[in-house]
Amino acid sequence: MSNFENKVIIKTDPEKCINCHKCISVCPIKLCNDVSGGYVSVKPELCIGCGLCIEECPHGARQGLDDLSLFLEDASLNQKIVAVIDPAIAATFNGHNMEFNGWLTSLGVEKIFDASWGAELNTKSLVNHIKKHKPSLVISQSCPAVVSYIEKFCPELLPFLMQADSPTGHTVKFIREFYPEYNSHKILIISPCYAKKTENIETSLGDYNVTLRSISDYFKTNNIDISSFPKIDYFNPPAERAVTYSTPGGLIHTCERYIPDIRKNSRQISGQPEVTNYLDFLAREIREGRTPKYMLIDCLSCQHGCNAGPATATDGKSVDELEKFIDIREESRKKIYSTQQESKLKIKKLHRVIEKYWQPEIYARNFENKNSTVQSYFSVPSKFALDDIYKTFGKYEESDLLNCGACGYNSCKEFAIAIHNGLNKPENCSHFNSLQLQNLQKSQREKLMQAVNMVKTSSLQEFSESDKGVEEISDVSAEMVNSVNTSSAAIEQMIQNIDSINSVLNKNSLTMNSLSEATKAGKISIEQVTKLVNDIEQNSRGLGEMSEMIQEISSQTDLLAMNAAIEAAHAGETGKGFSVVAEEIRKLAENSSLQAKQISDVLAKIKKLIDKTFNATIEAKKEIENVVSLAEQVANQEEVVKRAIAEQNEGGQQMLESLEKMRENTGSVNEAVEKLRYSTSKIRTAVQQINIREQ
């Protein structure tokens, strides 16, 4: 017996798992999920490796394991390797099969074989079994997840499981049998299935199971362009329509080449839980002794076959896109054998090529009944034990068995069996949690009522205090309105007074401007008078000098007249006439001297008056200049006063605007107070009506 208990092909990352139970809901083997801890782990003893949980988990907690890292490491160490590639590769890499072979060759893989050729050999094994034994039922063994399910959970179907290797197994044995030079080489299996690893271990036919998904991820991480590699053909004879084995119904389609009407007696089924449900149905028919309706059962665990499973990289592609490149391969292979028209001669020629490499004893496989071992990992409780388990998660009546599926299981019974086997716990039942919550609510109800009553009493007291506060706010608001109105009237009166002062200042400004102009004009006139007086004073000095000159001339004339009289006396009678003249001249000189003295006295007085006038004009000029200066100062001070008055007037206007806003705000406050009073009244009524109903 193989040590299948240690074959871990799917694991859970505890850091990513949030215990949402989605993985359980899609898993066909509910009991392979262990929820007894803080996350949903996988029991490899019960897991069939279908991988549905990997696709369903939105958190990336479920991970499939393969051997890519081991293969790359061995390849880098020049390990001798040959490869077997599943036909589903065409769907993942869009028909670049040959370029993929080129990439493998660049890593040192010596020869590459197509599992489609193994599918041709597998079809030969199946058809030979049908023709030789004419079975009432034969189940295809192509899908390792289906094989694992039958071995573990449907032992009744083991006799009807085709006792031969899978298409991949056929290919590996073909290599070992017909290419002995590669017997020492390790076998690399490129597959679309995590469960293929279990097959490799149990049959020892493959050393590495490397999935299409992990290779696709590797290409993306390392920026590898598959189309850049050279095309390398497969080393085996080309397969014909068996290249469609990866598509649901591909096996039956290939069998039709041998048995044209076989489809009438065949059932093709794919996808979970349809496949496991159908196998359970078949097992039940066998147990009950009934003959199944169909002889050939072609089943694949994945809904769209091997072309689009959890271990492929075809996310987002439609069924048409998935099968497009598979169909293209089929047409190209039919051209090789010229079987497009289903020519019997050409088909016989193809069959002779296949029969050259087919021998019944080479490809036989015996399957193992693992059910007894599997049964040791869990047990089904009795009805009485089941009733006791139901009670642990609140299932006391038949109506409590809701079968809601929130726990991930199909029924409350399945959940109870999981609890019985230590794989789950009551806390993961939503109904149980609801009951727990109800019990908690019930136990807390009295405390809640007490708390509510305390809150009611306290709230009503607070509302009473709040009412007083609201009334105080209302009173203060009314006083504020009065104050605002009074202040507004006073400020308006102040602004009117400021306007009156401003008007007086404007008039004074005009008067001061006139005074300033007049004083400036007087200053100019005084300056002119001062200049004239100064000119007169200068001219009066000339008159005094002239008066002195006249007196001097008069004195000399008088002296000459005296000398002339003396000379005339000496002349006697002769100078008598001249004496008369001299006397007249002396009189004139005396008279001129007297007049000149009088003029000099008058000029002296005039000079004194002129000097006084000049000094007085100088003082007047200074006084007028002082008046002009004072007038300018008054004008400047008046401007300062006017600016201050203007600023005070602007401030008064702003105060009026602020008071108006205050008046508006006090209106809003009053409205808010009324709303608050109304709301408080409603809340008080609501609080008084609070009551916790008994349930």
Image (cartoon, rainbow, N blue to C red):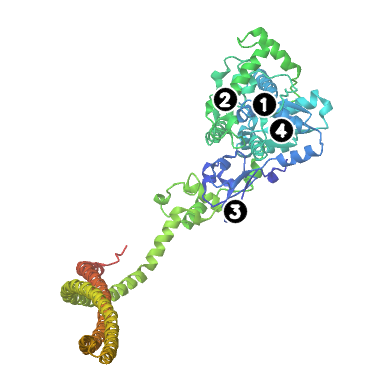
Residue type of the residue flagged with mark 2: Glu
> Furthest residue to the front?
573
Tell me which numbered mark, 4 or 1, is placed earlier along the sequence.
1
Residue type of the residue flagged with mark 1: Asn
Foreground tag (3 vs 1): 1
Above/below status of 428 relative to 519: above
Give yes or no for contact between labels 4 and 1 (Cβ–Cβ under 8 Å): no
Check disc 2 and report the residue beneath it: 323
Above/below status of 675 relative to 557: above
Check disc 4 and report the residue beneath it: 189
Tell me which numbered mark, 2 or 4, is placed earlier along the sequence.
4
Q: Is 166 left, or right, of 534 in this rendering?
A: right
Q: CA distance from mark 3 to mark 1?
A: 37 Å
Tell me which numbered mark, 1 or 2, is placed earlier along the sequence.
1
Check disc 3 and report the residue beneath it: 15
Residue type of the residue flagged with mark 3: Glu
Q: CA distance from mark 3 to mark 2?
A: 37 Å
Q: CA distance from mark 4 to mark 1?
A: 15 Å
Q: Residue at x 39, y 67 (%)?
A: 443
Q: For residue 190, which quarter of the picture?
A: top right
Above/below status of 424 relative to 579: above
Q: CA distance from mark 4 to mark 3?
A: 31 Å
Q: CA distance from mark 2 to mark 4?
A: 22 Å
Give yes or no for contact between labels 3 and 2 (Cβ–Cβ under 8 Å): no
Foreground tag (1 vs 2): 1
Check disc 1 and report the residue beneath it: 97
Secondary structure, mark 1, is: helix
